Structure formats: C-alpha cells, structure tokens
Amino acid sequence: MNPRHEILLIEDERNICNFIVTTLKTQDYKVDFAVNAVSGLSLAASGCPDLILLDLGLPDMDGIEVIRNIREWSNVPIIVISARTQEKEKVEALDAGADDYITKPFGTSELMARIRTALRRSALSGSTPLSAQNKYTAKDLVIDYEKHIVTVNGEIVHFTQIEYKILTYLSRNAGKVITYDSLITHVWGPFADSNNRILRVNMANIRRKLENNPADPQYILTEIGIGYRMIDNENL
Ligand code: CA
C-alpha cells in the first residue's frame, strides 16, 4: 500500500467530493479538500500535497486558471476531473500543465490507476527522470535509447527518423497523455502545421510495425480528439 501520499481534491460537487475523499482514504491516502478555487489554491500552497485532483468547473475561477497559477510555483502532479466531454477543454488543461485528466463518471480503479501513474512519474523525476533512463520496456517492446534499437519479442523493428522521434517522445512520457499539438511541435518544430494528418500517417506506420493488431493497439493508445498515451510499465 502507498506510504501515505497526500492528495488535495478541489471539487465543488459535494457528492463527488465525498465519494473521492472516502475512496482515497480507504486506499490509505491522506486527503484534504476544497470546494472552490481560492481555498484550493491556498491549501495547495500551505499543505504541499503530493498530487492535486482538480475539477475544471469551479464556481469562482476557471480550472485552467488554477492550473496556470499552480504551475507558476509548483510541479506537483495535477489530474483534472472533467464532467464535460469537450475535448478542447481537456487539451487546454493538458497544455496549461495538467498531467492527466479523468472524465466523470469514472470508476474507482480508473481513478486509482491514474493517481498511481502520476505519483510514480513524479517520484521518478525526483530521482532518475524517465527522460534520463536508457530503456523503455513494456510487454514485448523494448526501446534502447542509447543504441537506437527497438525490439518487439526480441526482433529488431526498423523505424524512420520521424517515427522513432515520435516513439521516443511518447515512451519518455509513458502513462501521460500527449496532445497532438505538443507532439507535432516536438517532432516537427514550433512552426509546423498543426494539421495532424501527417502525424496520423506516421502513427499508422508505427502501429503497423509495432502492434499485433493495429486496429486494437496495445502500446500506443488513442485519446480521441486529444492525443496519444503510451502505456506505462507499472513495474518501472
Ligand atoms: Ca464542478
């Protein structure tokens, strides 16, 4: 079980707030909560939580503003809770510095998995960040960053430079949603056309080489309308 990580929940809906607080306590997390942005920000500053769960639809301030405010002084992982299915808002939250999002209604196991991933990523960045590791391993896939070699089931798979760049960026951020725009900017540079057609073409090629069934990908998952998430090896 977790060594008493402290989680701050900022959520104005009482039912959801109670549900999450109860769930987290059952899982042995320490929990603090606020029902509006102003008190949430003040608790974030005074309590130094290990992770923040943030509802985007708060009565006193736009959730995106809350993220921007926190990011001015802290790298604490932020998982956004969004009732709305609007992709634009989630993309905006991720680009403002949120680490992940979860859409209402969500199940306990999904919430717990997201929290574990975010906490693990943040712990790693304090010791050996993912970006400094030599290898990515998940299921049958190994990416050796030093040798620039990708193997699936021990067999070397060849990728173009662009494909390898995409793969590297996603795997270095495994477990995290990467928006189309940030991926395009990273691979093609800040002046690239934000039309994601060329990205989709490359992704199709990567999946064809990587996946058993490209229509049902195991390694690189699509977050529709938002971006991609490469699976995170829970045993890292
Ligand atoms: Ca709300």
Image (tube, rainbow, N blue to C red):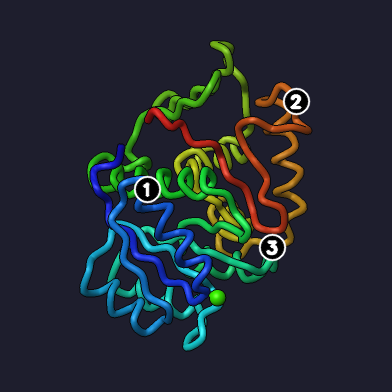
Looking at the rendered structure, the kind of residue marked 3 is Asp
Q: Is residue 19 above or below residue 122?
A: below
Picture coordinates of residue 191, whole percent (x, y): 60, 65
Q: Residues within 10 Å of mark 1 (few under 14, many from 20)?
A: few
Q: CA distance from mark 1 to mark 3?
A: 47 Å
Q: Are marks 1 and 3 in contact (CB under 8 Å)?
A: no
Q: Secondary structure at mark 2?
A: loop
- List the single residue furthest toward the top: 154
Looking at the rendered structure, the kind of residue marked 1 is Thr
Q: Which quadrant holds residue 163?
A: top right
Quarter of the rendering occupied by the C terminus: top left
Give me the residue at 42% from left, 78% from top.
Answer: 35
In this picture, residue 150 sits left or right of residue 38: right
Quarter of the rendering occupied by the N terminus: top left
Looking at the rendered structure, the kind of residue marked 2 is Asn
Q: Secondary structure at mark 3?
A: loop
Q: Quadrant of ligand 1?
A: bottom right
Viewer-nearest of discs 1 and 3: 1
Q: On residue 193, which mark appears?
A: 3
- List the single residue furthest toward the bottom: 60
In this picture, residue 140 sits left or right of residue 160: left
Viewer-nearest of discs 1 and 2: 1
Q: Are marks 1 and 2 in contact (CB under 8 Å)?
A: no
Picture coordinates of residue 162, whole percent (x, y): 61, 41
Q: Residues within 10 Å of mark 2 (few under 14, many from 20)?
A: few
According to the picture, the residue beneath numbered tag 2 turns out to be: 213
Q: State the count of labels.
A: 3
Give me the residue at 34% from left, 82% from top.
Answer: 39
